[in-house]
Image (cartoon, grey):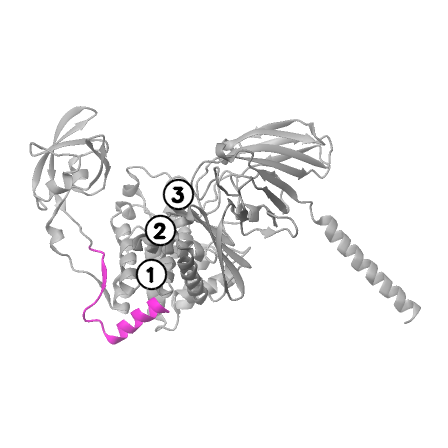
Amino acid sequence: MTRTALAALACAVAVAMLTTADLHAQAPEPIRYTLRFPDARTHYVDIEAAYPTGGQPTIELYMAVWTPGSYLVREYQRHIEGVTASVDGKPVPIVKSTKNRWRVTTGGARTVTVRYRVYSREMTVRNNWVERDFAMLNGAPTFLTLVESRPRAHEVSVDLPMGWTGTATALTPIAGAPHAYVAEDFDTLVDSPIVAGRPVTREFQVDGKRHVLVLEGDPSQFDIDRAVADVKKIVEAGRAAMGSLPYPHYYFLNMVVDTGGGLEHKNSFLTMSGRFTTRSPRAYQNWLSLVAHEYFHNWNVKRLRPVELGPFDYERENFVKTLWVAEGFTDYYADLLVRRAGLSNDADYLSALSGQIEAVHSTPGRLMTPVDMASYDTWIKQYRPDENTANTTINYYPKGAVVAFLLDARIRATSNGVRTLDDGMRLAMQRYSGAKGYTAEQFYATMSEVAGTDLRPFFAQAVESADELDYAQALDYLGLRFAPAGAEALRASLGVTTRNDAGRLVITGVRRATAAFEAGLNVDDEILAVDGVRVRPDGLSARLELFKAGDRITMLVARRDRLMEMLVTLGPDAGRPWRLEVRPDATSDQRARLTGWLSQ
């Protein structure tokens, strides 16, 4: 090699080494948290966090006020206590600068240690719970992070109390450090709940990827072996629908705590169930549907997402009009995946879809608010319902699921069965997952491309207006119908919901365009008598069975203790007019399409 060549080689090596050094220099030092439970019975987790300062004289920390997937500002900072800061063991000033921010005076130190406690006693998938035997921690209500724009790794070490044996989380383990994990950035930390205690686990592989079902709480009556076999079938059905598994591994975190709920995360989900879930056919079917829903989110919303849902602003609302896709389409696929996995039959699935349709059409607010606006208003309405909510808006979960059903049938019909909604979701995933995100117009265009026809008018009517949905094409294509009305159509209906309030029959809701609404009955009215005869708290339904639609009755009610007589003309009992069934005269082609849809 010539001297010139050697010089060139040395220069190239130096440049390569400089580039590597520069890259290392640019990678910010991680934030390091240690979680301790000095007395878990008191429901507290103690947190010690070491924050790199970069030599700045002050740093600012903040806590998220909401968590992705649950669209309500929840003010998590209200559970923080005892915030202190120190450098090398010596206290330094820390002051609260806004409702969820703290400013620390560093004195130029390279690292500041902050200690605080978090009260953790809300048994929901969006918050924290700590007790003697276990802890369930979500990222948003637990961790203070730096106010900064660049991504930074966050390391978490869990110091287990005596008697606790393990932790479970989708975070990446730190080699050689038990119960220690790293998140590549704050988004990943927020998106990775941690369960600690004595978790029971089962593992399985699909496409060479590790899947772990985790039970914590009281799993003594929960058949984990049956559950893990069925969860694997749901994973395989999801993979068949979407084409591939987009995660490195997946954790199914199920708290057996005799309550319900679920929340999706990027490489895991957190759900809650009862200890006897696997012993009750109905409860188990509901749990499988919940599992399928939260699992399908690993494609729909955690990767294929509305453009507004990333990067997240954790300190204020992130308004979005397409939660009917993110949640509603996921609800559609939940029951469909359970069916395609062979864990339910056709009748089960049609009953579940009928329930979604009925939920839409029994809500008067469907004629007031388009589903895209219901999505936009989720921050002020979805998680704060009152007695008038059903009269003014529509839930984007069931309506989005019904729109997905109609869209799936339309794509199949216009493409002569060649393409389906699965194709549309895969194409959207290919184009808009990750850092991109989609707008409503891009989603419409993608579905139109797959269908081979312009679906903009369909979305304008089904999503952007409050018009009634059109089922004709879907039912005809699949050979379905709504079951004919029976004798229930002649029954009388008042149109109220009630509760037994210590022996008082109290109205809790009045639906628009019902007998009660037209007569002027109000929420909190106490129903005392019908036609001069007392009605007991559990006797309203039986009394109404004595009448038929169109009958006039006199109701005696107490409104703020004042007695009032109200004349009411009873309306018809709707029964279940939205119950789907296979047409008796369905053709062989229609039956084949139905089978292909449900068993694909």
Look at discs 2 and 3 and give the one toward the viewer. Answer: 2
Using a 10 Å C-alpha cutoff, classify the residue at mark 1 as few (fewer than 14 neighbours), some (14 to 19) or many (20 or more): some
The secondary structure type at the circle numbered 3 is helix
Residue at 46% x, 38% y: name it: 73
Residue 458 shown left or right of residue 516 in the figure: right
Return the mark for residue 405: 1
Using a 10 Å C-alpha cutoff, classify the residue at mark 2 as few (fewer than 14 neighbours), some (14 to 19) or many (20 or more): some
Instruction: Look at the picture and state if 585 lies above or below 213.
Output: below
Using a 10 Å C-alpha cutoff, classify the residue at mark 3 as few (fewer than 14 neighbours), some (14 to 19) or many (20 or more): some
Taking the view exactly as shown, the residue that stands out farthest to the right is 3
Instruction: Look at the picture and state if 444 lies above or below 102.
Output: below
Name the residue type under label 2: Thr
Part of the protein shown in magenta: 577-600
Residue at 89% x, 64% y: name it: 7
Quadrant placement of the N terminus: bottom right
Location of residue 355 (image quadrant): bottom left
Name the residue type under label 1: Phe
Residue at 29% x, 48% y: name it: 366
* Disc 2 from disc 3: Cα separation: 34 Å
Instruction: Look at the picture and state if 232 lies above or below 532.
Output: below
Location of residue 553 (image quadrant): top left
Residue 578 in view here: yes
Name the residue type under label 3: Asp
The secondary structure type at the circle numbered 1 is helix
Q: Label 3 near label 2: C-beta < 8 Å? A: no
Return the mark for residue 377: 3
Q: Where is residue 170 in the image (x, y as percent from the top left)?
A: 54, 52
Q: Name the residue under label 2.
A: 277
Q: Where is residue 99 in the image (x, y as percent from the top left)?
A: 53, 31
Residue 464 in view here: no
